[in-house]
Amino acid sequence: MRKPTPGEKDLITPAEAIEFYTLSARKMWKLMDATNGFTVKYYNGRSLIIRKVFEEFLDNHPELRRRAYGKQGTKKG
């Protein structure tokens, strides 16, 4: 049996959100501490994010995603 991806789960951890949605860890932790447009649940000392609500929040705030670095097909010089 394979492990479900964060895109298939209803609740995800902040670490899964950072990796799956290509977010900055620093920005993610600031969002977790601030009042925001997505819901964070606490269960046995763990922070869990409701994925669908978080996706809607990211759709309204695309500036939170990291830029893709590396070779982009453009050359200098």
Image (cartoon, grey):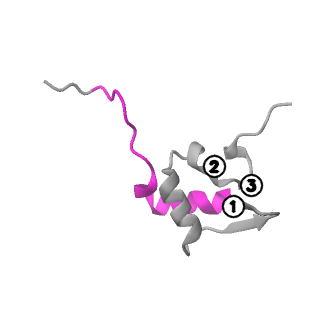
Q: Which mark is residue 26?
A: none
Q: Residue at x 51, y 64 (%)?
A: 30
Which is nearer the N-term, disc 3 or disc 2? 3
Q: Which residues are magenta?
A: 48-73
Identify the secondary structure beneath mark 2.
helix
Side of 52 relative to 25 (left or right): right
| Amino acid at circle 3 | Asp
Whole-percent x and y of residue 76? Answer: 17, 26
Q: Which residue is mark 2?
A: 15
Nearer mark to the viewer, of 2 and 1: 2
Q: Which residue is mark 1?
A: 50
Q: Residues within 10 Å of mark 2 (few under 14, many from 20)?
A: some
In the picture, the quarter occupied by the C terminus is: top left
C-alpha gap between disc 3 and disc 2: 15 Å
Q: Is residue 19 above or below residue 76?
A: below
Q: Which residue is mark 3?
A: 10
Label 3–label 2 contact, CB within 8 A = no
